[in-house]
């Protein structure tokens, strides 16, 4: 294991280091490590304190290979310090794509033009000390416990358990119900739910696990499951499935009522809404009891209205918003501190910020790395992280985690990227991102030379 903050001005890469993991954190080309020092200094000077996550996680998801969760340490300045890999016991996979270009591994990814293997958000999730990941290539789910003294240490709980269908791509966990659900996006599609036990791991609570059926025609990204989450009050499970922008099929949103006091916590009969104005609904976050802020791969963003009484979801015409020059708008994360959401594009180098209550687009930032696309996005306190895997079709052979610091509403900027080396073996099929929700606040100290971290 080796990692180092690379000072762009002074290259100090010891040649003797040739261990398996050799990623480095690189600051943008026109800055140097002084920038990070400034963040630490600002953290000390600021009265309210900076909020910084402790670790982030994603899956390597190698097609047909042994899947691993990569645990990355977040430094006190928001940058990433080191990483460790953990076998999940399952295999990586990708959504099959109907395409003429089918001569090899890359072709199994979305038309070889992007790097999103599963066409989904939330393929890896963290809640408290639990971490869950799908193994898309072996139709299973793995549960880990995160060590609270060493966030890079993960312990597998039980064996990987069947997802009961094909191609599991998205997960949702409710602490109140102590229930995990998985959405299967392949031929045998549907949503299965599990009880979560600290020691025994997962046990399915459904008698007919795929009764919560999707039933779409799948053609590449079209017709596949995009995202799944429990509403903030945990009274509903929301499952989002893409339609088809070519054949003009509507996207589908299924909402399942939950029952905290019964053995089977999630109803098998859902309320289905069809959203024809948004044919490629993708990632979604709830921003108020009645509003879901979603992305659509065919045009931009959509603010959906949720009626908690009828469980119906609609898209008012005026809440559909095009993003100029967008290519594949996908992942979305919300920032409670500023009531903003951030959106990435799988084929473009940029992060766009929207004001959640008004829907207004407020900022648009590119990463100085020039990396061609960003998939999953996660907020860790005052920092934003994106998973930006290599994408040969778009000219990048390098995978990285990119970092922006959020300094206020409408204010965020690139602070660098944790760049994986060839030996790290993080490829285009890497997927998912979850951040340990524990954030630490760096408090003001009398002497500026010493930082104190409170967890
Ligand atoms: C780093 O950048 C700052 C200004 O951004 C500059 O003053 C300083 O000399 C640079 N340090 C190195 C080592 O390049
Ligand atoms: C990279 O990962 C793949 C998939 O698990 C594996 O087959 C291959 O041996 C790995 N390569 C290296 C150099 O570790
Ligand atoms: C990317 O390509 C460059 C140039 O060929 C090479 O030096 C580098 O090791 C490659 N990186 C990875 C992660 O494969």
Image (tube, helix red, strand yellow):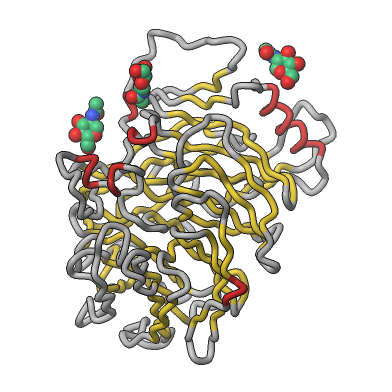
Q: Is residue 333 at least partly visible in the picture? A: yes
Name the residue rendered at 40%, 70% in the picture.
240
Q: Is residue 151 at least partly visible in the picture? A: no
Q: Is residue 28 left or right of residue 41?
A: left
- Dividing the image into 4 quarters, which one contains the N terminus? top left
Name the residue rendered at 45%, 41% in the picture.
373
Q: Report x, y in % for residue 164.
A: 19, 69
Name the residue rendered at 43%, 62% in the picture.
282
Name the residue rendered at 38%, 72% in the picture.
179
**Of 206 and 111, the residue lying toward us:** 111
**Of 269 and 124, the residue lying toward us:** 269
Q: Report x, y in % for residue 347.
A: 44, 44
Answer above or below: position of 230 versus 131: below
Q: Report x, y in % for residue 389.
A: 39, 38
Answer above or below: position of 27 versus 156: above
Answer above or below: position of 210 versus 280: below
Which image quadrant is residue 52 in? top right
**Of 342 and 168, the residue lying toward us:** 342
Q: Report x, y in % for residue 168.
A: 27, 61
Quarter of the displayed picture in which ligand 3 can be seen: top left
């Amino acid at each position: 294991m080796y990692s180092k903050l690379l000072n762009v001005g002074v290259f100090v890469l010891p040649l003797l280091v040739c261990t398996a993991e050799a990623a480095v954190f690189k600051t943008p080309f026109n800055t140097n490590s002084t920038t990070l020092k400034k963040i630490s200094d600002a953290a000390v000077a600021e009265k309210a304190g900076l909020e910084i996550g402790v670790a982030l996680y994603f899956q390597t998801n190698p097609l047909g290979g042994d899947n691993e969760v990569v645990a990355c340490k977040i430094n006190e300045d928001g940058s990433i310090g080191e990483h460790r890999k953990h076998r999940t016991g399952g295999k990586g996979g990708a959504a099959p794509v109907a395409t003429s270009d089918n001569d090899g591994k890359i072709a199994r990814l979305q038309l070889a033009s992007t790097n999103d293997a599963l066409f989904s958000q939330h393929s890896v999730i963290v809640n408290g000390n639990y971490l869950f990941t799908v193994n898309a290539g072996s139709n299973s789910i793995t549960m880990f416990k995160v060590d609270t003294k060493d966030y890079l240490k993960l312990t597998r709980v039980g064996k990987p358990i069947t997802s009961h269908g094909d191609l599991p791509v998205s997960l949702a966990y409710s602490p109140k119900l102590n229930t995990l659900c998985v959405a299967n996006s392949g031929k045998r599609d549907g949503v299965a739910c599990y009880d979560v036990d600290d020691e025994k791991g997962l046990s399915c609570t459904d008698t007919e696990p795929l009764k919560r059926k999707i039933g779409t025609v799948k053609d590449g990204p079209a017709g596949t499951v995009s995202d799944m989450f429990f509403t903030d009050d945990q009274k509903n499970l929301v499952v989002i499935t893409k339609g088809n922008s070519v054949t003009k099929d509507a996207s589908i949103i299924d909402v399942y009522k939950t029952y905290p006091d019964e053995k089977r916590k999630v109803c098998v009969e859902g309320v289905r809404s069809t959203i024809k104005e948004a044919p490629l609904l993708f990632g979604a976050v709830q921003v108020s009891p009645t509003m879901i802020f979603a992305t659509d791969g065919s045009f931009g963003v959509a603010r959906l209205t949720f009626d908690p009484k009828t469980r119906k979801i609609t898209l008012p015409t005026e809440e559909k918003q095009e993003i100029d020059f967008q290519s594949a708008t996908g992942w979305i994360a919300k920032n409670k501190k500023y009531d903003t959401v951030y959106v990435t594009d799988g084929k473009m180098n940029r992060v766009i910020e929207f004001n959640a209550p008004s829907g207004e687009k407020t900022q648009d930032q590119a990463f100085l790395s020039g990396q061609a696309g960003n998939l999953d996005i996660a907020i860790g306190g005052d920092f934003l992280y994106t998973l930006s895997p290599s994408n040969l079709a778009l000219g990048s052979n390098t995978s990285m985690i990119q970092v922006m610091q959020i300094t206020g509403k409408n204010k965020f900027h690139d602070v660098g990227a944790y760049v994986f080396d060839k030996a790290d073996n993080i490829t285009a099929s890497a997927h998912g991102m979850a951040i340990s929700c524990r954030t630490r606040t760096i408090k003001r100290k009398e002497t500026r030379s010493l930082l104190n971290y409170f967890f």
